[in-house]
Image (spheres, rainbow, N blue to C red):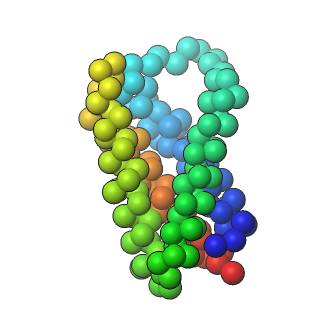
Amino acid sequence: MSAVSTLAAGVAYFALGGLWFTPLFGRYWDRAVGFQRPARWRPALTYYLVPLAGCLAVSLTLGFLLGRVAAVSLTEVLGLGLAVGVGISFAVTSINALAPNMPRPALYAAVTGRYHVLGAVLCAAIHFWLRG
């Protein structure tokens, strides 16, 4: 996979997170982790940079895997994205949700895990569409 598809997929995954954790499911995530957003809350730059780096890492890894398994159809590519999303991302998110200080672990796993599943599938699709 190309650097362009890796960058595009990673940025799209990150942008999905901006929608997912703010207007779409932000209130549920806040409840899951026990966070109350103060009025006019402005998170630190690391709040954005670390997730962006993670999304780029997932995109790079999916691009690598797609090249190794020689997936040629959109169905195969989306299947790999789904396998990575469910088998790795959702699974790890669910394990991390069991931290003793997590107020609502099932809600956290549902909100965050589903984001990562969709993000992995999105990354795989973008790699497929931008393959060179």
Residue 16, image x and y in percent?
55, 49
**Of 132 and 14, the residue lying toward us:** 132
Residue 17, image x and y in percent?
54, 44
Q: Quadrant of residue 84?
A: bottom left
Tell me which residue sits at (31%, 38%) in the image.
95
Tell me which residue sits at (39%, 19%) in the image.
34
Q: Check the picture and name the quadrant holding the C terminus.
A: bottom right
Tell me which residue sits at (59%, 15%) in the image.
39
Q: Is residue 12 visible?
A: no
Relative to residue 30, is residue 64 depicted above or below? below
Q: Which residue is situated farthest in the bottom direction here?
A: 72
Lateral position of residue 131 relative to residue 84, left or right:
right
Lateral position of residue 83 relative to residue 39, left or right:
left
Tell me which residue sits at (34%, 18%) in the image.
101
Residue 103, image x and y in percent?
31, 21
**Of 27 and 99, the residue lying toward us:** 99
Q: Check the picture and name the quadrant holding the N terminus.
A: bottom right
